[in-house]
Image (cartoon, rainbow, N blue to C red):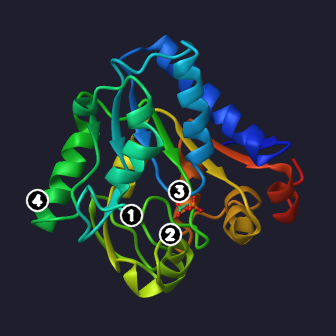
């Protein structure tokens, strides 16, 4: 696991946007695994600016997203399809036919099977972007006694529902289940890049970068088993987590 400590979250976002644009420039038809949440927003802003400046071309890029809330249609303003359209896809020259966000509507088993098929189609992601939950979740693979390899429907934990309530009018509006890519497809990516900032992530990040344990109680720790994984954090978070470099 490569641990990158930057001076600020802004610098982390620029660092990861550069990783992504370098990949696209090296491999114009690359496949990106993309994430939602507050953390990736500045990364996507950087990519939009680079695209506008002619520094990166999305015309042949393919994308697959990690997850989607159950019960929200793609035009709901809290759905992850809507998030991706409004935070990235609508502002760059990507072909939306080359983007995939799982459906949170309809037959859950069929949707989960489709997500795994899309993750595998033409090869797994060249780069998988990840945030991390306060409880160490990656995508919506929640912390607990077991993890599931395949894509599946996950019951969201209290911690996740509370953390995501800030995006909704009230906590009771947050869906309690979501479709998520399973651990296998995430870890099958050629490169996995986890980005984090903020005091709420301190304990999850400490477990990820300051001890050797791999545990289902912090799903991000499985990145320790990946040959080409990166954790990108700012100095404030690194110091809070007790990282000594
Ligand atoms: P956040 O979410 O970026 O909004 O903190 C991260 C996550 O839950 O994976």
As measured in the structure, the alpha-carbon distance from the residue carrying label 1 to the one carrying label 2 is 7 Å
Judged from the image, the quadrant occupied by ligand 1 is: bottom right
Q: Nearer the viewer, residue 171 or 147?
A: 171
* Secondary-structure class at tag 4: helix
As measured in the structure, the alpha-carbon distance from the residue carrying label 4 to the one carrying label 3 is 27 Å
Badge 2 is on which residue? Answer: 167
As measured in the structure, the alpha-carbon distance from the residue carrying label 2 to the one carrying label 3 is 28 Å
Q: How many numbered dots are placed on residues in this image?
A: 4
Q: Could you tell which of marks 4 and 2 lies nearer the N-terminus?
A: 4
How many residues crowd mark 3 within 10 Å: few (<14), some (14–19), many (20+)? some
* Secondary-structure class at tag 2: helix
121 vs 69: above or below: above
Q: Nearer the viewer, residue 11 or 84?
A: 84
Where residue 194 sits in the image (x, y, percent)? 59, 48
Disc sitting over residue 110 in the figure? 4
The answer to whether the residue labelled 2 contacts the one labelled 3, judged by CB atoms less than 8 Å apart, is no
């Amino acid at each position: 696991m490569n641990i990158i400590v930057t001076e600020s979250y802004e610098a982390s976002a620029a660092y990861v946007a550069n990783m992504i644009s370098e990949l696209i420039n090296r491999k114009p038809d690359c496949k990106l695994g993309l994430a939602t949440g507050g953390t990736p927003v500045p990364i996507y802003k950087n990519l939009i600016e680079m695209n506008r400046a002619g520094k990166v071309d999305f015309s042949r890029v393919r994308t697959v997203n990690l997850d989607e809330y159950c019960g929200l249609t793609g035009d709901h303003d809290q759905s992850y399809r809507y998030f991706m359209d409004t935070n990235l896809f609508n502002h760059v020259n990507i072909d939306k036919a080359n983007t995939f966000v799982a459906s949170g509507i309809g037959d859950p088993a069929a949707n989960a099977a489709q997500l795994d098929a899309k993750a595998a189609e033409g090869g797994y992601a060249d780069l998988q972007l990840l945030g991390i939950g306060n409880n160490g979740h990656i995508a919506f693979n929640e912390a607990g006694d077991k993890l599931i390899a395949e894509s599946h429907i996950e019951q969201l934990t209290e911690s996740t529902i509370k953390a995501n309530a800030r995006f909704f009018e009230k906590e009771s509006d947050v869906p309690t289940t979501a479709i998520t890519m399973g651990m296998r497809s995430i870890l099958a990516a050629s490169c996995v890049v986890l980005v984090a900032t903020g005091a709420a992530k301190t304990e999850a990040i400490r477990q990820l970068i300051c001890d050797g344990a791999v545990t289902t109680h912090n799903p991000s720790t499985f990145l320790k088993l990946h040959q080409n994984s990166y954790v990108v954090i700012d100095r404030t978070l690194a110091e809070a987590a007790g990282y000594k470099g």
